[in-house]
Structures are given as structure tokens and as C-alpha cells.
Image (cartoon, helix red, strand yellow):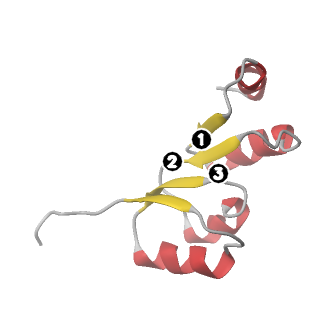
Amino acid sequence: MNIEQTKELVSAGITSIGENRTDMFLEKYEALKDNKDIKWHFFGYVQSRKIRDIVNKICCLHSLDRISLAIELNKRLEKPLECFIQINIRRA
């Protein structure tokens, strides 16, 4: 979904918006950052070096999959962040 389509959804009253690519999230966030009603969700793998770019812009992370990411989040968070924890239950 592009920025214009996202703007149309927001105009229609949709306020929970999700993205799974950091670059696309940042483009959409910048285009819509004046709308304080939007609740941004991030899905998918997050590289530790990119967490600083999204951490205080999202309301929910759907892919907390490793301790190192949790530690990096903890260092950078300005307020609590809802997260879905991804656990590998496969036996080694």
C-alpha cells in the first residue's frame, strides 16, 4: 500500500496502520506524522541497528523475537511499548 492509499484509509477513519518494512514505515510516518490519532504497528523482522529509527514512533511491535532486540528496545524506549513475543518452541 502506498502513501496515498494509506492517507485514504486514515481519512475513512482507520487509525491502526501496520507496516513490515522499515523504509516504507518511515516514509508513511513522515507523511502522516501530524495525525496524532494513528496507532502505528510494526510487523516482521527488525534489525537491531534499525530499531532506533522506529522505536518511539510505533505503539506495538509484533515481532519481538530475540533477547538482544529486547535489550536494545529497553535502552531506547521513552515510554512502554506493547509487543508480541515470538518464541521458537522447536527442540534443539
Outermost residue, left side = 91
Foreground: 59 or 42? 59
In the displayed structure, does residue 33 sit left or right of residue 62? right
Q: Nearer the viewer, mark 3 or mark 2?
A: 2
Residue 11: percent from the left, percent from the top?
Answer: 78, 21
- Give the Cα distance between marks 3 and 1: 8 Å
Instruction: Please provide percent x and percent y for residue 26.
Output: 74, 48
Q: Kindly identify which residue carries mark 3.
A: 22
Cα gap from disc 1 to disc 2, whole angstroms: 6 Å
Q: Where, quadrant-wise, is the C terminus in this rendering?
A: bottom left
Rendering quarter of residue 18: top right
Identify the residue at horizontal 61%, vertical 68% (top origin).
80
Circle number at residue 43? 2
Q: Which numbered disc flags the more N-terminal residue, 3 or 2?
A: 3
Q: Residue at x 63, y 53 (%)?
A: 59
Disc 1 + disc 2, Cβ < 8 Å: yes
Q: Position of residue 42 (x, y in %)?
A: 57, 49
Identified by mark 1, the residue type is Glu
Q: Farthest residue toward the right?
A: 34
Q: Quadrant of residue 56?
A: bottom right
Query: Badge 2: few (under 14), some or many (20 or more) residues near its Cα, within 10 Å?
Result: some
Determine the secondary structure under disc 3: helix
* Residue type at numbered disc 2: Phe
Q: Position of residue 41 (x, y in %)?
A: 59, 46
Residue sitting at 53 percent across and 55 percent down?
61
Q: Which mark is residue 19?
A: 1
**How far is the residue under mark 3 from the one under mark 2?**
10 Å
